[in-house]
Image: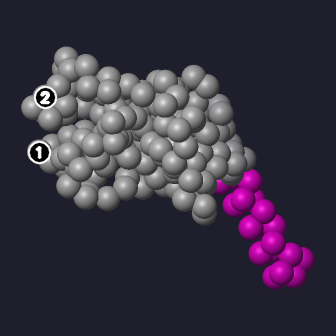
Amino acid sequence: MNFTKIAGLLALVALIAGCGNALHNGTEMDVSSVVVTGLPTATYPPGTAMVFSYCMNVSSDLWVHSTTTDFTNAKYTASVAANGSLTYTFSPPVIITDPILKFLLIDPGTNWSSMKIDKKVGGKNGGDVILDNNWGGVANPVTVKGVVSGDNVTWTIE
């Protein structure tokens, strides 16, 4: 075998090892839930409704809050619990096929200057949450978790 054939064979083995397992299907990430803990009750009292608005198509910048049908869909709405948590459960999961998951949690009344959760909890222009797609696929749905500390939110995919 010459060097080109060996290099090609090694590349194929690396590709199969990296993408051929059940943890990485290469086509999508399925988000089954989004959970935020530690919300300040002064700003987000129990019962406060919030909408999970994600960018459904990053290249065209199409968001859930861009269309009335999606923005008012109960699938994307959850209420703050007495313990300061906010939990969205998606069945079926939200399917992400873009390289990133880009989202905000926003007030259904569009009072986004004070009722918006992104990288911050106070609606102070913290910036959209952007997480890398893990490409885990339908066999490996994920939970997106946000932990509030002061005005900042740390986001992870689990």
Mark 1–mark 2 distance (CA, rounded to whole Å): 12 Å
Question: Residue 104: x percent and y percent?
Answer: 38, 46
In the picture of the structure, the residue carrying the numbered disc 1 is 150
- Looking at the image, which is closer to me, 66 or 154? 66
- Looking at the image, which is closer to me, 80 or 111? 111
> Going by the image, does 59 lie left or right of 112?
right
Q: Residue at x 32, y 27 (%)?
A: 49
- Looking at the image, which is closer to me, 32 or 104? 104
Q: Residue furthest bottom?
A: 3
Report the span colored magenta: 1-18
Quarter of the image for residue 92 reads top right
Quarter of the image for residue 39 reads top left
Q: Residue at x 81, y 72 (%)?
A: 8
Task: Tell me the SS state at disc 1.
Answer: loop
Q: Residue furthest top?
A: 82
**Up/down of 112 relative to 79, above or below:** below
Task: Tell me the SS state at disc 2.
Answer: loop
Q: Residue at x 34, y 32 (%)?
A: 50
- Looking at the image, which is closer to me, 3 or 72? 72
In the picture of the structure, the residue carrying the numbered disc 2 is 41
User: Can residue 136 be seen here?
Assistant: no
Q: Main secondary structure of the magenta part?
A: helix
**Up/down of 116 relative to 138, above or below:** below
Q: Magenta segment: does it hold 15? A: yes
Q: Crowdedness of circle 1 by 10 Å Cα count: few (<14), some, many (20+)?
A: few
User: Can residue 97 be seen here?
Assistant: yes
Q: Magenta segment: does it hold 38? A: no
Label 1 or label 2, whichever comes before in sequence order: 2
Q: Residue at x 26, y 26 (%)?
A: 48
**Up/down of 148 relative to 139, above or below:** below
> Going by the image, does 78 lie left or right of 75?
left
